[in-house]
Image (cartoon, grey):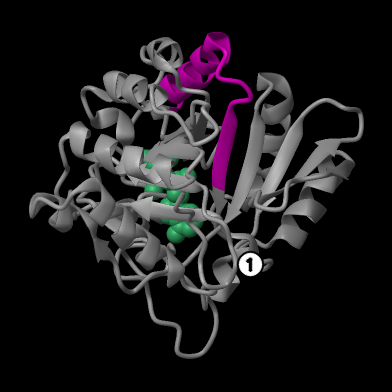
C-alpha cells in the first residue's frame, strides 16, 4: 500500500479541504473587504474523489474549511459521503469543520447526524460590539454564540474556539476568553497572527506570543500545562481548579513544522503542502484530463515527498505565500 511520507520522514495524515473561498465575514486582519472570491469552487463529487484517494493513502482526518464552508449548500450530504469513506484500517476518517459559526446554529445537529465529529468556531472577541468591529458584520456575536451552544448540544464535543490575537487590537480579550471557556465549557485556543493576510500588515511586533498570552491568562487564574500529542499544534493548559481548558497555537514564536502532518486542497482543487507554499500542485487539472485514480495517487505521493521543511516567517528574504489565508483555507 502507498503511504504518505515526505522527504523529512514526516507522516502525513491530516487533510484540509477548502470548499469555497467566499466568506460572509470581512475580518479586518484577514481580508481587505474589497476582494470577494478569487478562485473556483468544485462540485462536491470532485472533492470526494480526491478525499477517497487520499484516505486510501493514509489520511485519517479531514477538516472542511474555507472561506466560510457553511456558505456551500449541500455540505451536510458531503459530510455524509466523507463519513462513508474507510481508512486502510477500516475505520471512518475523523471529520472536522472550521467555521465562523454565523450559520451554525441550525445546521450543527444535521452535520453531527451526517457524521461530523468536531467543530472549531473562530471568534476574536467575546463582546458583541468588538466582535462587530472585527468582522465588519452587525449582530454576528449572537448568531455565533447560538452556533457554539447548538454544537455542544448536538454533541460535537469538545467545541473549540479559535482566537487570533493582534497587538493593540484584541489582546485585552485574553482573560475574558478564559472566563468564556469556563462558562461555555469550550476549549479556547489562541493563535499567533501569521503573515497571510490580504493587506500585508504583519510585523513581528503585532504578534501576541505564547509567553505573553500565558502571562496575561495567569494574571486572571493560574494555569497548568497538560500533555499534548506530538503532531498536535496547540500547547494545552487547564485552569488549576480543573474548570476550563485553553490552548495556544504558536507557529511564529514556537514553530511546529518538524511535526507537521498536514496537506491542503484549495477550493479550486490545488494541492498545497504548506500554508506558506509558494507553489501549488494542480490535482484537479489532472482529474479533468481524465487521469485514473492510480495516476492521481502517484501524483499526490510525489507532491507530498517534496513538502517544505518549514516556514520562514520573520527571516530575512521571507517570500509570502502564493495565496492569502482566506483563499488557501485556514
Ligand atoms: N471562515 C472560517 C472561519 O472563520 O473559521 C474558516 C476560514 S478562516 C480563514 C480560518 C481561521 O484562520 C480563522 O480562525 C481565522 O481567524 C484564521 N486566520 C485568518 N488569517 C489569519 C492569519 N493571518 N494568521 C493566523 N490565523 C488567521
| Towards the viewer: 111 or 253 | 111
Residue 254 x %, y %: 69, 66
Q: Is residue 92 left or right of residue 10?
A: left
Identify the residue at image location x=16%, y=41%: 42
Q: Is residue 25 left or right of residue 313?
A: left
The question of residue 143 being in magenta is answered with yes
Identify the residue at image location x=69%, y=21%: 185
- Asked whether mark 1 lies closer than 8 Å to ligand 1, one says no
| Towards the viewer: 144 or 58 | 58
Q: Residues within 10 Å of mark 1 (few under 14, many from 20)?
A: few
Residue 209: tell me if it is visible: yes
Identify the residue at image location x=62%, y=48%: 190
Q: Is residue 3 above or below residue 186?
A: below
Q: Is residue 301 above or below residue 119?
A: below
| Towards the viewer: 38 or 277 | 277
Q: Is residue 277 above or below residue 42?
A: below
Residue 38: tell me if it is visible: no
Residue 198 x %, y %: 31, 63
- Label 1, on which residue? 258
The question of residue 153 being in magenta is answered with yes
Q: Main secondary structure of the magenta part?
A: helix
Q: Which residues are magenta?
A: 141-163
| Towards the viewer: 298 or 232 | 298
Residue 215 x %, y %: 81, 55
Element carrying mark 1: helix
Identify the residue at image location x=38%, y=22%: 84
> Hey, which residue is sitting farthest bottom in the picture?
316
Residue 109 x %, y %: 44, 10
Amino acid at each position: 500500500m502507498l503511504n504518505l511520507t515526505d522527504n523529512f520522514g514526516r507522516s502525513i495524515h491530516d487533510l484540509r479541504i477548502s470548499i469555497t473561498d467566499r466568506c460572509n465575514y470581512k475580518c479586518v486582519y484577514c481580508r481587505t473587504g474589497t476582494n470577494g472570491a478569487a478562485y473556483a469552487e468544485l462540485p462536491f463529487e470532485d472533492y470526494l474523489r480526491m478525499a477517497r484517494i487520499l484516505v486510501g493513502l493514509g489520511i485519517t482526518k479531514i477538516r472542511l474549511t474555507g472561506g466560510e464552508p457553511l456558505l456551500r449548500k449541500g455540505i451536510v450530504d458531503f459530510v455524509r459521503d466523507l463519513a462513508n469513506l474507510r481508512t486502510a484500517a477500516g475505520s471512518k476518517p475523523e471529520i472536522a469543520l472550521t467555521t465562523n459559526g454565523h450559520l451554525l446554529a441550525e445546521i450543527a445537529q444535521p452535520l453531527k447526524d451526517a457524521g461530523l465529529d468536531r467543530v472549531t468556531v473562530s471568534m476574536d472577541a467575546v463582546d458583541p460590539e468588538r466582535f462587530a468591529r472585527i468582522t465588519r458584520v452587525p449582530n454576528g456575536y449572537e448568531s455565533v454564540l447560538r452556533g457554539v451552544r447548538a454544537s455542544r448540544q448536538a454533541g460535537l464535543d469538545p467545541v473549540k474556539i479559535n482566537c487570533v490575537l493582534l497587538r493593540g487590537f484584541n489582546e485585552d480579550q485574553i482573560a475574558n476568553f478564559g472566563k468564556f471557556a469556563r462558562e461555555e465549557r469550550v476549549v479556547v485556543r489562541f493563535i499567533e497572527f501569521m503573515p497571510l493576510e490580504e493587506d500585508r500588515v504583519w510585523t513581528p511586533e503585532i504578534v501576541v506570543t505564547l509567553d505573553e498570552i500565558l502571562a496575561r491568562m495567569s494574571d486572571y487564574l493560574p494555569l497548568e500545562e497538560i500533555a499534548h500529542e506530538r503532531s498536535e499544534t496547540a500547547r494545552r493548559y487547564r485552569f488549576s481548579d480543573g474548570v476550563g481548558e485553553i490552548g495556544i497555537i504558536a507557529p511564529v514564536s514556537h514553530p511546529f513544522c518538524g511535526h507537521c502532518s498536514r496537506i491542503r486542497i484549495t477550493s479550486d482543487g490545488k494541492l498545497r503542502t504548506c500554508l506558506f507554499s509558494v507553489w501549488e500542485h494542480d490535482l484537479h487539472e489532472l482529474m479533468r484530463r481524465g487521469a485514473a485514480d492510480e495516476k492521481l495517487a502517484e501524483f499526490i505521493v510525489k507532491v507530498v515527498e517534496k513538502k517544505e521543511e518549514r516556514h520562514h516567517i520573520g527571516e530575512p528574504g521571507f517570500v509570502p505565500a502564493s495565496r492569502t489565508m482566506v483563499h488557501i483555507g485556514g
